[in-house]
Image (spheres, rainbow, N blue to C red):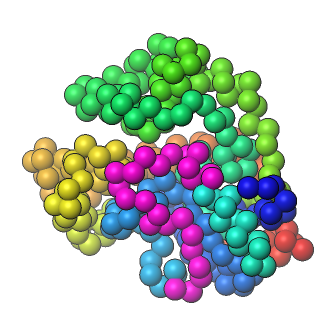
Amino acid sequence: MAVETLPSRVLVVAGPTASGKSELATALAEALGAEIVGADSRQIYRYMDVGTAKPPAELRARVRHHLIDVVDPDADYDVAAWRRDALSVLADIHARGHAAIVCGGTGLYLRSLEHGLFAGPPADVALRRSLEREEAQSPGTLHVRLARVDPPSAARIHANDLVRLIRALEVFESTGRPLSMWLAEHGLSERPFVTLTLEVEVAREELRERIEARSRAMVEAGLVEELASLHARGYAPATRAFQAIGYREAGLCLAGALPRRALAEAIGRATNQYAKRQRTWLRGQADTVKIAHGDAEAALRLARTFFS
């Protein structure tokens, strides 16, 4: 796709999970006549609705959303595929004369969109499946191996982030060089458009309460039953998408390894840890503008100035 077909400016709404990003992005999109592009690595999956906190139907009816429900749970869909699709969607939105708001909390997606992506070797499906089986048999094995061959990557990739662990090891196995070395040489220096990133801020205790309430709501809405229905559709319990927070814990419930009464607490604990990692990532982004949760007026003033 030619770069000139892309918009010159893209607004980004980021923040930790449960901070109210979707609500703010929808309010801004309505006021600006914009469309929303999802940047969430779990909301891309069809049929996985309860545990991914997709924007509710009410919000999606008010504003057009993209890159939600785009692939099946067993699809091989990585950050390169998302970036390709996101650029295509942004070009289409621009061609129709609308502004675009990218909304999500997956840092790798946001970084790839704003700064480019080291392409790396093509996916090796057989190797990925082998690594997945190895991790399933002995949890933590892949992070230990990555720490041995690529310490910088191991330091920034969480031990539970199976997708990124596997990709880092895949790059090393395929090229003989660590991912961190490739990234250092690439420099992530692409700048396809100017961005303004609004970071939704929520007090730590309030965010914890919001996460715990969402976790309880997921369980009450039938998260375990949703996962069971996905298994019944033919998606294996080891499907990579089911390693996402919420589905991983629901899988333990189905396997009898986690009592149903402890499920919401387990999801809340894992989600709080994830939110902490998201906040850490955002602290490293020097150009974000912090917006207090609920302050849509301030966000709209900034957005209008940015697009003007």
Residue sitting nearer the eye, 151 or 261 = 151
Left or right: 297, with 242 as reference point: right
| As drawn, 245 above or below 179 | below
User: Where's residue 129, x and y in %?
Assistant: 33, 33
User: Where's residue 89, x and y in %?
Assistant: 65, 65
The residue located at (35%, 55%) in the rendering is 73
The image quarter containing residue 234 is bottom left
What span is colored magenta in the figure?
A: 61-84
Q: Quadrant of the N terminus?
A: bottom right
User: Where's residue 103, x and y in %?
Assistant: 61, 64
The image quarter containing residue 284 is top right
Q: How many marks?
A: 0
Instruction: Residue 212: tell me if it is visible.
Output: no
The residue located at (61%, 66%) in the rendering is 37
Q: Is residue 204 magenta?
A: no
Residue sitting nearer the eye, 15 or 184 = 184
The residue located at (55%, 14%) in the rendering is 176
| As drawn, 79 above or below 45 | above
The residue located at (59%, 16%) in the rendering is 177
Outermost residue on the left side: it is 256
Instruction: Residue 20: tell me if it is visible.
Output: yes
Residue sitting nearer the eye, 42 or 23 = 42
| As drawn, 178 above or below 167 | above
Q: Is residue 69 magenta?
A: yes
Left or right: 249, with 211 as reference point: left
Residue sitting nearer the eye, 88 or 50 = 88
